[in-house]
Amino acid sequence: MEIWERSSIRFMLNAKLDELHGEGFEDFFHDVMCVLNPGFLNVRTAGRLGDQGADGLLLCGKKLYACYAPQTVVPSSIAGKFKTDLAKAIEKRGNEFKTFVFVHNDRRGIHPEVASLLATARDDHPELSFENFGRRHFYAEFCRMEKWQSRTSLARSPQNRWSSASYWKNWSRSWITSPNTGAPLRTCRPSPDLRSRRWNITGFPGMSAIA
């Protein structure tokens, strides 16, 4: 994958993740993992059973995934849910996983208190491994995808402003190319008002080009 393609993916992925919380974020995570891993199980809730402490299971790696994407990060609330999910997973799925993966949507990274929480859980449960799965991990997974897979995953959510038909119709035109070689020089993206038919050039504030 070319560097300009990776830059475009990073921009669109961040735009999408900024808008996803709760069940919407969990659904997006399921979409990504199902594309990349045939052995991934997107666990749904089932009446009184709930999800038994798992938002997803990876059969081949014996990993259990738990998603945390509140609109407002409150460490004490996350700590309570984390402890509840971990206890439930150990009780109900003790033989099904060896690694507990904390999946989150924090743009800046994992909160210091949450990091300490994971370290404490590692010490309390030496038989288990604990991992973090955040935005950089999402980006790395998207870079592994084929182009049609990344496009499908990013466009699936109807509430995302970058998933509109107009955006994808114009996406292939959103590159400035060299007049000599035709190679892309800088990535561009549609402005929020697509009717203006103007493009904002990533990395050059205030500059634009007419489509």
Image (cartoon, rainbow, N blue to C red):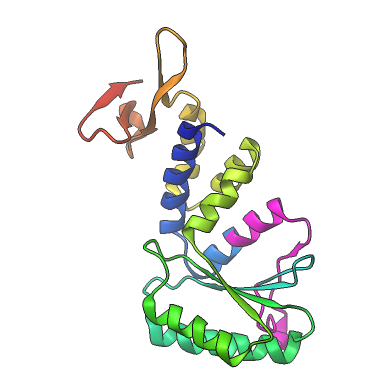
Residue 41 belongs to magenta span? yes
Q: Position of residue 114 (x, y in %)?
A: 44, 80
Q: Magenta segment, which residues?
A: 29-55
Quarter the N terminus occupies:
top right
Q: Based on the displayed image, in which of its 4 quarters is residue 97 positioned? A: bottom right
In the depicted structure, whether residue 133 falls above or below residue 210: below
Identify the residue at image location x=47%, y=27%: 170
The answer to whether one can see residue 126 in this image is: yes
In the depicted structure, whether residue 144 falls above or below residue 25: above
List the single residue furthest toward the left: 206
Q: Position of residue 86 (x, y in %)?
A: 61, 86
Residue 183 belongs to magenta span? no
Q: Based on the displayed image, in which of its 4 quarters is residue 62 positioned? A: bottom right
Identify the residue at image location x=58%, y=66%: 26
Between 45 and 36, the one nearer to me in the picture? 36
In the depicted structure, whether residue 82 falls above or below residue 26: below
In the depicted structure, whether residue 201 falls above or below residue 87: above
Q: Position of residue 60 (x, y in %)?
A: 79, 65
Figure label count? 0
The answer to whether one can see residue 166 in this image is: no
